[in-house]
Structure formats: C-alpha cells, structure tokens
Amino acid sequence: MTKLANVFIVDDNLHCLEFLTLAFQSHSGVDVTGEIKPVTALGRIRKEMPDLVMLDIKMPDLDGFGLLAMLRGEGNFVPIVMCSGSTRQKDVDRAYAEGCNGYVEKPSTLEDYRSMAGAIVDYWRRGELPKH
C-alpha cells in the first residue's frame, strides 16, 4: 500500500505519545514519529517536513501555542491538529486564531485514541486536509 502520511506527534507526556503513536500505527499506510521535547520537535518538524503534526498544548519550555506560532511565523503551513486535555473555549479559539487546522480533546483510552486517529486518517484519505 502506498504511504498515506507522515504524522509527527509532539507531547511531553510519554504515555500520551505512546497511545497516539499506537493509534496512528494501527491504520495502514501511516508512518509515525514523535518527540517529547517541544524545542527539539521544532527543529525536527523543520527538517523532516511531516504531512501532519499532532500537537499538545501544555508542555514545559515551549508550549503548543508557542510552537504553533513559531512555525506559522516562519511560513511553515504544515497541517497541525491540536490534541489537548483542555476543552476550554478560550484555548480552542486561541489555537484556531494562531493557525491550527483542527482541535481535538485528548481521549482517555487506547480505543478512543484509535477512533480519533481513524477519523483523522479517514479525513486525510478523502483529501480534505490541506497540503503544505
């Protein structure tokens, strides 16, 4: 099968990073890499040019909003889906205002992570996610 997408996950919580990785890997044709350190992730995203970034918000040193702003500020328009435990409307509005392409609440079980990843992969397969 042809490679569907390169998904890059940024989350400082190793448990969440592992669940997201497993969730996307359960869908054929998806290559997944990830990083727990946001500053390191920024450099890797610039270099690796993934097709999609799944980005947590609350992280030390550089939060997801900061990483998003830096990428958009330098003209990098890789599709970014914010995946956060925060459901505050203020965070959702800010994420979209700063240029994210989607916002999802972090699931609580591996099965829920798989369902979320499946919805994103299906969306991708229909060609509805913008290419950068």
Image (cartoon, rainbow, N blue to C red):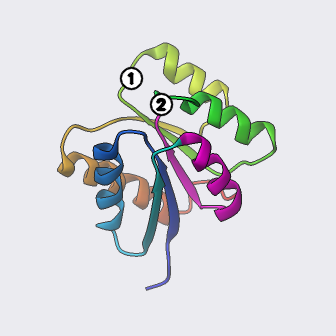
Q: Would you say residue 49 sits in the magenta stretch? A: yes
Check disc 1: other Cα within 10 Å, few if <14, some if 14-19, many if 20+.
some
Q: Amino acid at mark 2?
A: Met
Earlier sequence position, callout 1 versus callout 2: 2
In this rendering, the count of numbered labels is 2
- Extreme residue toward the bottom, this view: 1
> Pointer 2: residues within 10 angstroms few (<14), some, or many (20+)?
some
> Would you say the residues marked 1 and 2 are in contact, meaning their CB atoms lie under 8 Å apart?
no
Residue 10 appears at what percent x and percent y? 48, 46
Q: Nearer the viewer, residue 106 or 1?
A: 106
Report the disc number at residue 86.
Answer: 1
* Residue beneath the point at 67% across and 59% down: 131
Percent coordinates x, y for residue 96 in the rendering: 60, 29
Q: Tell me where the magenta segment starts and ends, as one range.
A: 38-56
Residue at screen point 36% across, 61% down: 24
Task: Report the residue at 42% width, 39% height from top.
Answer: 12
Q: Is residue 114 left or right of residue 1?
A: left
Left of 17 or right of it: where is 97? right
Looking at the figure, which quarter contains the C terminus? Answer: bottom right
Horizontal side, residue 40 vs residue 57: left or right: right
107 over 98 or under it: above or below: below
